[in-house]
Image (cartoon, rainbow, N blue to C red):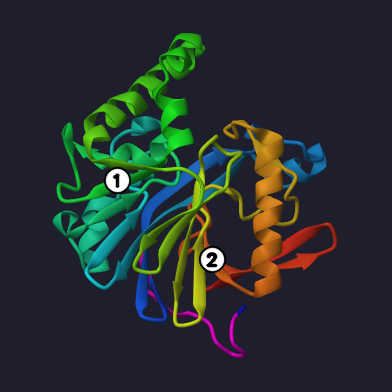
Amino acid sequence: MFAAGASPVFAATRTVQSAQVGEIKVTTVSDGYIDFPTGAYTNVDTEVLAGLGDNLRLGANVWIIRSGARNILVDAGSGSFMGDAAPGVGNLNERLHEAGTTAREITDVIVTHMHPDHIGGLLVGGQIAYPNAQFHVSNGEWGFWTSEELLSAAPEPNRSMIMGIQSIATAIKERVTFHQGAYDLGAGVSVEPAPGHTPGHMVVRVSSGGLQFFLLGDAVISQDLQFQHPEAYSAFDAIPDLSVKTRKDLFDKLAADEIAFSATHLAFPGAGYVSKRGAGYVFTAIG
């Protein structure tokens, strides 16, 4: 719970937002945007979806956590992985300097989950983009995506994506620390299981000076839909019912304790608060 009147202090430019959480600085960097088809969502009235149009423009945010000597990157954006399928993303590497750092200064990379728009930027030209970093991935996430059975059972349209994910995993595997359940990385940063969107999806908690700031990854992927209708899920949710439960549980906690948070696909700068309203929630953006 925040002390009365206490909250992280935010400041933003066009592509970078900083939040001071006690002694820790969290910088949100925009990797660009993704136009996501509204028809990919389900479990919500068709009239609701019709009112949103054919596509929703989603943010694509990543974060850099500076705590002591640690520069911790949370997710790595798309890099060139998405190609023509999502031409609006892949801007992280050129924007690192706007966030006041370089790829060589990153000490850790937390992977909330292994979808292409979160790990595509881990490699540049086939080489690890963050040469001095240790990578952090949940056991369940790694096991799911690197399974030989996953590739052999996948429908043909999905195989190239899975092969790309597995290629990235092969490149970084010697430098991965695997986490089971909740895990404290030190420096005021911890990860917590938040499964559903993928089997091993994690969220990140930043804590310092009595303040907290959560990074939700893809626990919510539509600012326009999933606050008012948290029961809505997308074709990219691996375990749809669990994704809904995880989202509601997180929203309830963040609302009750008045904790600021960000999420990958909220419109940049992607930070705010959530409050309960009827069967749904309301998001109030900061910045």
Which stretch did the figure color magenta?
A: 2-17
Judge whether 196 appears above or below 182 on screen: above
Indicate left or right for 109 with 192 as reference: left
At mark 2, the secondary structure is strand
Residue drawn at the location 50% of the way across and 81% of the way down? 210
Marks 2 and 1, the one that precedes in the sequence: 1
Question: Could you say which disc has been placed on residue 251 in the image?
Answer: none
Q: Is residue 14 visible?
A: no
Residue 20 position within the rendered picture, expressed as x and y whole percent measured from the top left: 40, 78
Residue drawn at the location 50% of the way across and 14% of the way down? 154
Residue labelled with disc 2: 261
Q: Residue furthest bottom?
A: 5
Mark 2 against mark 1, which lies toward the viewer? 1
Residue 31 position within the rendered picture, expressed as x and y whole percent measured from the top left: 36, 52
Which image quarter is the N terminus in?
bottom right
Residue 23 position within the rendered picture, expressed as x and y whole percent measured from the top left: 36, 80
Q: Main secondary structure of the magenta part?
A: loop
Identity of the amino acid at label 1? Answer: Phe
Residue 110 position within the rendered picture, expressed as x and y whole percent measured from the top left: 36, 50
At mark 1, the secondary structure is strand
How far apart are the two marked residues, 2 and 1, measured between alpha carbons?
A: 23 Å
Report the front residue among 257 and 180.
Answer: 180
Question: Could you say which disc has been placed on residue 135 in the image?
Answer: 1
Identity of the amino acid at label 2? Answer: Phe
Residue drawn at the location 32% of the way across and 33% of the way down? 81
Indicate left or right for 166 with 181 as reference: left
Indicate left or right for 83 with 70 as reference: right
Report the number of numbered marks. 2
Instruction: Decide whether residue 16 is among the magenta residues.
Output: yes
Graded by Cα atoms within 10 Å as few (under 14), some (14 to 19) or many (20 or more), the crowding at tag 1 reads many
Indicate left or right for 273 with 172 as reference: right
